[in-house]
C-alpha cells in the first residue's frame, strides 16, 4: 500500500513543530531593549561591543570616546558619513536617534559642553554624501588629529590609528 508523501510529511512537520519549546510569555522579568539600542546592537554592536567597548587596536572604542568627534565640525560630519552609518537601513530620524544614543549615552563624558544632538535633517544631508575614500584610515587619522587639537583630552582616539598604521606597515599584525 502506498501513502501519499506530501500529506504524511505535512503531518510529521506539524507534529515536530508542536514539540518545539514555546517562548515564554512576556513578563516584567524579561529584559526589554529600547528600539534605539536595538538598532545600535544590530548595526554596530557586533564590532564595537554591546556597551561600546571593543578591542580598540582593531575596532575603535565608542564608550567614553565617541563624543570627542563633536569637538570639530569635520569630526561631527565624519561619524555620519562613515559608509556603515550612512548606508544604514534606517530612516534619517531613526539613524539620528541611534547616533545620538551612541554619542550622548555611550560617549558619556567625552561629549563637549554645548554639543547639540543630531537632527533628522542633518543626518539626511550627511548621509547623502558618504565617504568614498580608498584610504579611510588615513582620513580618520586626519580627522582625529583635528579633534585632538580642539579637545586635547581626546588623545586616546589616536590609539586605534597608531595600531592601524602599525598593521599597514607590517608591524603588530593581529
Image (tube, rainbow, N blue to C red):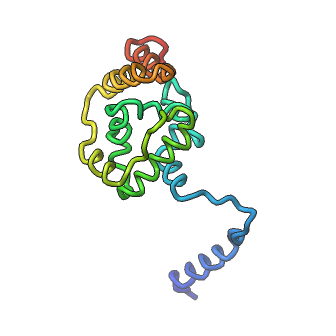
In this orientation, which residue lies closer to the viewer: 18 or 9?
Answer: 18
Q: Position of residue 73 (x, y in %)?
A: 33, 33
130 lies left or right of 25: left
Given the current orientation, which residue lies at the most extreme front position?
Answer: 114
73 lies left or right of 40: left
Q: Quadrant of residue 166?
A: top left
**Rendered view: 95 above or below 136:** below
**Rendered view: 97 above or below 82:** below
**Rendered view: 37 above or below 22:** above
Given the current orientation, which residue lies at the most extreme right position?
Answer: 29
44 lies left or right of 119: right
119 lies left or right of 10: left
Q: Is there any visible trace of residue 134 in the rendered image?
A: yes
Numbered label tally: 0
Q: Position of residue 66 (x, y in %)?
A: 48, 34
The quadrant the N terminus occupies is: bottom right
Image point (55%, 86%), residue name: 2
Given the current orientation, which residue lies at the most extreme bottom position?
Answer: 1
Image point (59%, 43%), residue name: 50
Q: Is there any visible trace of residue 21 in the rendered image?
A: no
In this orientation, which residue lies closer to the viewer: 168 or 21?
Answer: 168
Image point (45%, 23%), residue name: 151
Q: Position of residue 92 (x, y in %)?
A: 35, 55
**Rendered view: 140 above or below 29:** above
Image point (39%, 57%), residue name: 93
In this orientation, which residue lies closer to the viewer: 168 or 22?
Answer: 168
Q: Position of residue 84 (x, y in %)?
A: 37, 43
Amino acid at each position: 500500500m502506498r501513502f501519499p508523501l506530501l500529506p504524511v510529511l505535512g503531518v510529521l512537520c506539524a507534529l515536530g513543530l508542536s514539540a518545539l519549546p514555546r517562548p515564554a510569555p512576556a513578563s516584567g522579568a524579561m529584559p526589554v531593549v529600547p528600539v534605539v539600542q536595538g538598532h545600535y546592537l544590530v548595526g554596530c554592536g557586533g564590532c564595537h561591543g554591546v556597551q561600546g567597548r571593543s578591542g580598540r587596536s582593531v575596532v575603535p572604542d565608542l564608550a567614553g570616546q565617541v563624543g570627542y568627534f563633536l569637538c570639530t565640525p569635520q569630526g561631527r560630519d565624519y561619524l555620519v558619513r562613515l559608509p556603515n552609518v550612512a548606508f544604514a537601513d534606517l530612516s534619517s530620524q531613526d539613524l539620528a536617534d541611534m547616533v545620538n544614543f551612541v554619542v550622548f549615552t555611550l560617549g558619556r563624558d567625552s561629549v563637549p559642553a554645548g554639543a547639540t544632538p543630531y537632527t533628522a535633517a542633518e543626518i539626511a544631508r550627511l548621509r547623502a554624501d558618504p565617504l568614498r575614500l580608498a584610504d579611510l584610515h588615513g582620513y580618520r587619522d586626519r580627522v582625529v588629529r583635528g579633534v585632538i587639537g580642539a579637545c586635547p583630552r581626546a588623545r586616546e582616539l589616536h590609539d586605534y590609528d597608531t595600531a592601524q598604521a602599525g598593521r599597514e606597515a607590517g608591524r603588530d599584525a593581529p
